[in-house]
Amino acid sequence: MNSEFTTEFDGLVEKFAELITDSDSPDMVEKIKIWSIYNHIHKTMPALASHWNQTHPEGKAAIRGLYEEIRRLNMELKAKNKSTD
């Protein structure tokens, strides 16, 4: 891939992270990438996700924690935005 595309796509992911969690830090962007890919796999190939969960219970717990963190941050952002309206 060319570097211009990569830069532009990274910007898209950074904005996505910011809109979902109110953070575009490199750590949060990486979490959003993992969350997004796992979410897509879980929805499009649930058997693969289930197999991975069974063979990697520590990974499953990490994904669960990631989901909960992103959900919490998103709910906090929504509440903050609602209170400023």
Image (tube, rainbow, N blue to C red):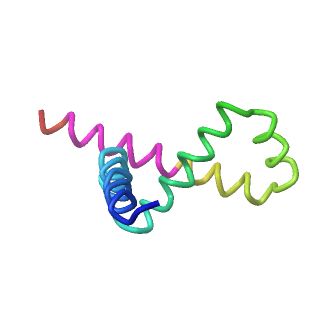
For image coordinates 13% across by 39% down, the residue present is 84
Residue 13 colored magenta?
A: no
Residue at the spot 81% in from the left edge and 34% down from the top edge: 47
Please tell me which residue lies in front, 3 or 74. Answer: 3
**Residue 24 seen anywhere in this rendered image of the structure:** no
Residue 62 % position (x, y):
66, 57
Above or below, 44 against 3 in this view is above
**In the current view of this chain or complex, which residue is farthest to the left?**
85
Q: Is residue 70 magenta?
A: yes
Q: Which residues are magenta?
A: 69-82
Percent coordinates x, y for residue 76 in the rendering: 34, 45
Would residue 27 be found to the left or right of residue 82 on screen?
right
Q: Is residue 57 left or right of residue 10?
A: right
Of the pair 48 and 25, the residue shown nearer to us:
48
Vertical position of residue 19 compared to residue 11: above or below: above
Residue drawn at (30%, 51%) of the image: 15
Residue 20 location (% of width, % of height): 36, 45
Residue at x 58% of width, y 47% of height: 37
Residue nearest the viewer, comparing 29 with 1: 1
Q: Is residue 28 left or right of residue 22?
A: right
Examine the rendering and report whether any part of residue 33 can be seen: yes
The quarter in which the C terminus is drawn is top left
Residue 63, x across and y down, in percent? 64, 52
Classified by dominant secondary structure, the portion drawn in magenta counts as helix
Question: How many marks are shown on the rendered structure?
Answer: 0
